Image (spheres, grey):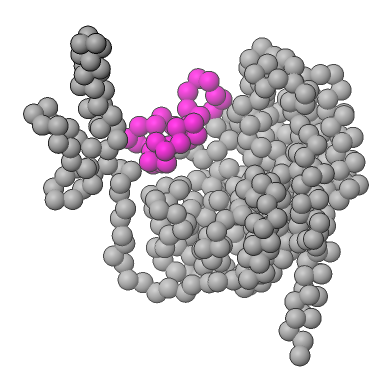
Amino acid sequence: MFIVAKILRLKCQVFLPLFLIFGGVAVSQDSPVSEPLDGREGRELLLKNFRPQAQLKVAEHLRNKAAFPVVDVHTHFFYKLRSSQQALEDYVAVMDRNRIAVSVSLDGSLNGRLEEHAKFLWGRYKDRFLIFANVDWLGDGTRDNPATWACHRAGFAERTARQLAEAVDSGVSGLKIFKRFGLEYKNPDGSLIKVDDPRFDPIWDACGKLGIPVIIHTADPAAFFEPVDETNERWEELSRHPDWSFHGPNYPSRMELLEARNRVIGKHPNTNFIGAHVANHPEDLDVVSRWLRKYPNLYIETASRISELGRQPFTARKFLMQYSDRIMFGTDGPWPEARLHINWRFFETADESFAYSEKVPPPQGMWRIHGLKLPDDVLQQLYFENACRVIPGVKARLMKYRQSQAQEVQP
């Protein structure tokens, strides 16, 4: 009994100080009393505890709804609402208050969930929602054994093309490709599947023939591919989400991924592609501009990237003005309503130095953003006109929304 007690006491002496240090406090060797690293009264400050309050006093032009009807082309109603009818009802009310006419849910997996998801969204609100399908890469395979996955079986792409045709017949408006394609899905030998693997060409061809766009998320923010060290501008975010880092030999480079995606876009000129998150390269809009000039079948959307656009307001405004017929609005939501209000403020006002998120700390970089004050004609292209041209089903739903709004204002 004495020996056990001595061992436990020794373990506490070794591990408790480590626990306290990594828990955000400093421990002196001379004293067991700890101090919080909160930056107060001369103490050091942990980055995760940094909560700067801006002292700027500048004009504010808050927005609680969009200036025009909006089509949100990038939402995730399965992953974020999890088939909760009450949550759906609540968000439709948010859409009504914010003038969001149509939301596009990108969560219609062809693994059997599509029908369930359509029933959830279209049971009462078919005129307010569109659905994009997702490729079922694994099928009945085992996740940790790529050799068993459906995508490695003969005829997979052709079968998927037939599934997409059936989905379009049922009302589906597009195909969404997630970032796991290129960063996670593997070949039987353990190597990552390449985004431009020719085995899947029939899928992209089918989308063109069916008249539906492909919204494709390839790679991630530039900082996620850099070493997670003192030079990484998103160290604080990556410290909270270490699994978001794709730096190192286990992953292709970011530009390797984006160039592979671009080869797919160039190889299939009859299919429209929507580059998610400003084509996942908002840190360098000059490069995105070159892509848009080179690939007339490429469009982009803004979901979860006003944080990047808003810290380069002059460049971003020029970019959105120049390519106003190629850019769509997206949120990556549904988010809290406060996030929507920030979007309207960002695109519609010239406000300076405001938070891009309602979250504390901000989720995508420790900085603030500035508004773009886009002219009305550009706002209309961004908010709904481009989506009407590219995504089947948007125009008809938008017309119904306008009619319902007109009826509500009639005396």
x and y percent of residue 86 in the render?
Answer: 67, 58
x and y percent of residue 155 in the render?
Answer: 87, 22
- Above or below, comparing residue 229 to residue 310 in the picture: above
Residue found at the far bottom of this picture? 411
Residue at 22% x, 27% y is 17
Residue at 55% x, 38% y is 220
Q: How many marks?
A: 0
Q: Is residue 204 magenta?
A: no
Horizontal side, residue 201 vs residue 165: left or right? left
Q: Magenta region: which residues? A: 224-253
- Residue 391: which quarter of the image? bottom right
- Residue 162: which quarter of the image? top right
The answer to whether residue 347 shows anywhere in this view is no
Residue at 78% x, 66% y is 398
x and y percent of residue 208 in the render?
Answer: 84, 42
Residue at 59% x, 59% y is 320
x and y percent of residue 125 in the render?
Answer: 78, 61
Q: Is residue 238 magenta?
A: yes
What is the chief secondary structure element of the magenta stretch? loop
| Nearer-the-camera pick, 26 or 58 | 26
| Nearer-the-camera pick, 155 or 144 | 144
| Nearer-the-camera pick, 194 or 70 | 70
Q: Work out which quarter of the rendered image holds the N terminus and state it.
A: top left
- Above or below, comparing residue 123 to residue 248 in the picture: below
